[in-house]
Image (cartoon, grey):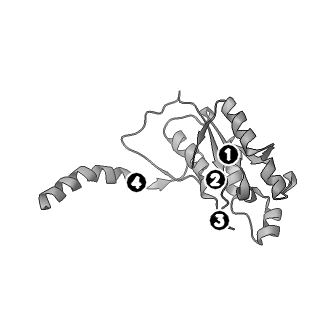
């Protein structure tokens, strides 16, 4: 039994050492998108091109940063850190359902929840890094959210389904959360 445990520990130690890395933000978005280095490295390089859309329907707890939105910052940071030029990465986030409340401007968010929208700095960082943020117009209509309630730079599509169909025609793949 002891010999078997020693063999397992010897075999598994490299796996645990890879998984037990520190998580750091940057190099593109400094305050969000923590990621770990993975050894022995990746096969990504300056010729890699990524066009990816994300679907977001779940709202964060009030006053908290939406973890799924933070995944887009992580996607950008980890790929740039591994040799993919930022200009070779095109991301889009299609937001529907209750998640659209995380895209409210601070005045609208405070009126609804009585506190500041913790997602604003992340959303601004994503927009500054050319991430398209697209709201489902059907969800906005259902929840009575006007374009003026949303943060500047957020787009409104006819529907989330329409946005995904158009993004796919433009060469985006869907990355499930």
Direction from residue 118 to residue 82 in the image, left or right: left
Q: Which mark is residue 78?
A: none
Please determine whether, in this image, residue 87 is positioned above or below residue 30. above
Looking at marks 3 and 4 on the same chain, the residue that comes earlier in the sequence is marked by: 4
**In the rendered view, would you say 136 is above or below 59?**
above
Looking at the picture, how far across and down is residue 57, in whole percent?
67, 54
Q: Mark 1 vs mark 4: which is more N-terminal?
A: 4
Element at badge 1? strand
Number of numbered discs present? 4
Contact check, label 3 and label 4, Cβ < 8 Å: no
Which of disc 1 and disc 3 is earlier in sequence? 3
Q: Nearer the viewer, mark 3 or mark 1?
A: 1
Residue ID for mark 1: 93
Q: Secondary structure at mark 3?
A: loop
Q: Are marks 2 and 1 in contact (CB under 8 Å)?
A: yes
Residue indicated by mark 3: 64
The Cα–Cα distance between marks 3 and 4, rounded to whole angstroms, is 25 Å
Q: Residue at x 13, y 61 (%)?
A: 1
Q: In the image, residue 96 lies at what x, y percent?
A: 72, 51
Residue 117 can be seen, yes or no: yes
Query: Where is residue 111, by image quadrant?
Result: bottom right
Q: Secondary structure at mark 4?
A: loop
User: Is residue 6 depicted above or below 91 in this figure?
Assistant: below
Q: Residues within 10 Å of mark 2 (few under 14, many from 20)?
A: many
Question: Badge 3: few (under 14), some or many (20 or more) residues near its Cα, within 10 Å?
Answer: few
Left or right position of 82 against 32: left
Residue at the spot of label 4: 21
Mark 2 vs mark 3: which is more N-terminal? Answer: 3
Q: Nearer the viewer, residue 101 or 140?
A: 140
Which mark, residue 69? 2
Q: Quadrant of residue 105?
A: bottom right
């Amino acid at each position: 039994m002891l010999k078997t445990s020693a063999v397992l520990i010897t075999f598994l130690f490299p796996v645990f050492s890879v998984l037990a890395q520190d998580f750091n933000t940057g190099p593109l978005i400094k305050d969000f998108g923590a990621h770990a280095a993975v050894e022995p490295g990746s096969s990504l390089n300056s010729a890699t091109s990524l066009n990816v859309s994300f679907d977001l329907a779940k709202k964060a707890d009030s006053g908290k940063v939406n973890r799924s939105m933070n995944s887009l910052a992580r996607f950008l940071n980890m790929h740039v850190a591994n040799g993919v030029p930022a200009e070779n990465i095109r991301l889009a986030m299609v937001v529907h359902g209750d998640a659209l409340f995380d895209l409210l401007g601070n005045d609208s968010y405070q009126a609804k929840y009585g506190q500041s929208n913790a997602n604003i700095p992340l959303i601004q960082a994503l927009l500054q890094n050319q991430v398209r943020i697209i709201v489902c117009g059907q969800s906005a209509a259902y929840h009575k959210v006007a374009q003026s309630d949303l943060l500047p730079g957020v787009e409104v599509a006819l529907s989330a389904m329409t946005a995904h169909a158009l993004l796919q025609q433009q060469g985006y793949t869907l990355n499930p959360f």
